[in-house]
Image (cartoon, rainbow, N blue to C red):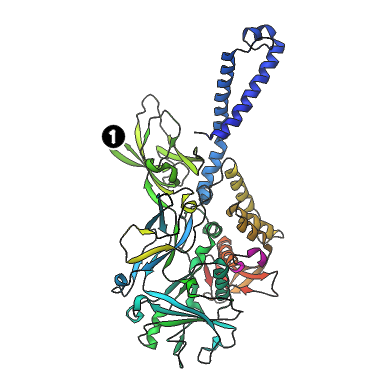
Amino acid sequence: MHAFEDIAGLYREELRSLREDAVRFAVRNPGMARQLGLASDTQPDPLVNLLLESFAWLAARVRADAESRLPLVSHSLLGLLYPQFVCPIPSVGVAEFIPNPAGVAGLPDGFGIPAHTPIHNRDERGGVLRWRTARPLTLHPAKVVRASIIPPASWMPAAAQGVPGVLCLRIEGIAGLSLAKFGLPSLSLHLGGDRFATFPMHEWVHGACKDVFLADDAGAAKPRALSLGREALCHAGLEPGGRLFPESAYALPGYQLLQEYFAYPEHLLFWEVGGLERRRELGDLPGFDLLFPVDAPPPKTVSSRLFRTCAVPVVNLFERMAEPIRVDHERSGHLLVPDLRHRDSTEVHSVIAVDALEGGERSSVMPYFSLSGEGDAPPSLMWFLRRKPSLDGIGTDVFLHFKEAAFRPETARPWVASARVLCTNRHRAAERWRQGELTRDTDMPTAAIRFCGPPSQQHDPPMFGGELWKLVSHLSLHQLSLSGPDADNVLRELLRLYAPPRDAFAQRQIAGVNGLCAKPLIRPLRSAPGCAARGTRLTLTLDEDAFTGGSAFLFAEVLDVFFGLYAGINTFTQLVLKTCNRKGTWHRWPLRSGALPLI
């Protein structure tokens, strides 16, 4: 049950201590030592040595078990308060679903793919790697066929006049399909490809876009255009309900947002352009142009390959019914095996539910550390888990323990436990993936499904003391304020809790937080004339050089949402972004209360 390398060190320590005690005993009691075979002037008895080694091994096991009790408490508390710390961070990627023209031609409203739809691919050895979609997706025939940056023209709305550049995206149907036959009220765009092109493009558009307007053909002599308003463009990656990992009812959603950003920031590069049903005002258009006037110097290159219209984040998570466990009361913990035939490529991420089967009856088993809502009477049977490094050296193993309130050894009978678990493919999803197509598990009108780039690495949770450190660090940071004189250090320490410690890119970004200043703010309430609300204006200063290969603006967008969720009830926040590389304010976000911006 214990990691061999952990017990080996304790065994050597116990054996050395026994032999040192034997030497001291022989000096004080030479006669007895000679009879016991411990005297230094006699030939060592191999049976005595074997006895000492056996005792040292048993003592090491007892010590290892005793020392693991404290991490058990911290692990259980973390599992309730901060569940993101006790589970592996699975591999994450973005998959593009390429529609089948014949399959979507007769679907004017598109084909809906719900969140958690399973797909799979095979690794280089032929093993199955399973994924699921993180958000809903609508398959439609729209595609970006041309992308360019053009100068403002006289026919464009007033917001476009005087800007350095206008991003123009030509949207047409695949295989010659006319978009006039499809509803298409909104269009999802993912920036996929080289991060040195995608992050600057997102930063440019979302940082300084003045308006969104639609034209029938921007290249025509007299285009017809209408303004959709700046609010038509939203950052879909930060919208509520779009999280990658399972959400906890007890944990602050902002913490999960930080963890997901550091796990795979590319999953946030999703735009949503709404109001496209208004294109009917320009007639039945087979295709149209979306134009974004941006009041900032444009990037050097732009390509239609950067914009994917039917893409969605995917996560290496899948459900399984674990192998049945026979609980015979002869052991304290039971190894939870999600797939007996593929143990080396299947790891338990979290336990969804546990049932007990006894005498032909099935009953639910409650977690030991949970809010059951059943008053003062505790359940008669409860479970808790312990996670340990895998004996195979890849990932972790989970042991299931049961606590019976009225357990009597003399009358106890064996019973069977059944667990529904959420699994990953250990580290194989990222290490052994191959560039190729994914396969759908359910019927859908797709011609192909492909990764937009390599998925992220899986990260194991902290073990053997790391859990306690995470818990104490988080609780101590709660006693510190982001409005104090040491606010930037508090923010950096908080971010380090959610960034993989060996991820140099993430650690460099955290070090790029150069300052955080908070000032009180009072604003009148529109819903209650004569009343006002108190809030905080947070001025964040970043070093853009620390975000090479990423985006300081995207990092600040994440913190803007996080600060809104982190603030107290009945208050609001406003984030102002400055950098060491620019003069003045780079960007000022709207007031925010919780997850919602107050415009």
Instruction: Kindly identify the amino acid type of the residue bearing the numbered disc 1.
Output: Gly
- Nearest the viewer among 336 and 419 is 336
- Nearest the viewer among 377 and 123 is 123
Q: Where does residue 96 sit, x and y in percent of width and height?
A: 42, 65
Rendered residue at 59%/27% (across/down): 11
Does any portion of residue 415 appear in the rendered image?
A: yes
Tell which residue pokes out farthest to the front in this image: 125
**Which span is picked out in magenta?**
543-553
Q: Residue 533, relative to residue 385: is it above or below?
A: below
Q: To which residue does mark 1 refer?
A: 359
- Choose top left, top right, bottom left or bottom right for residue 262: bottom right
Q: Where does residue 301 sit, x and y in percent of width and height?
A: 56, 76
Q: Where does residue 574 sit, x and y in percent of width and height?
A: 60, 69
Total count of labels: 1
Residue density around tag 1, few if under 14, some if 14–19, many if 20 or more, within 10 Å: few
Q: Secondary structure at mark 1?
A: loop
Q: Residue 6, relative to residue 165: is it above or below?
A: above
Q: Residue 285, relative to residue 580: is it above or below?
A: below
Q: Where does residue 340 sit, x and y in percent of width and height?
A: 38, 40
Image quadrant in which the C terminus is located: bottom right
Question: Is residue 552 part of the magenta span, yes or no?
Answer: yes
- Choose top left, top right, bottom left or bottom right for residue 210: bottom right
Question: Is residue 585 part of the magenta span, yes or no?
Answer: no
Q: Residue 474, relative to residue 541: is it above or below?
A: above
Does any portion of residue 346 appear in the rendered image?
A: no
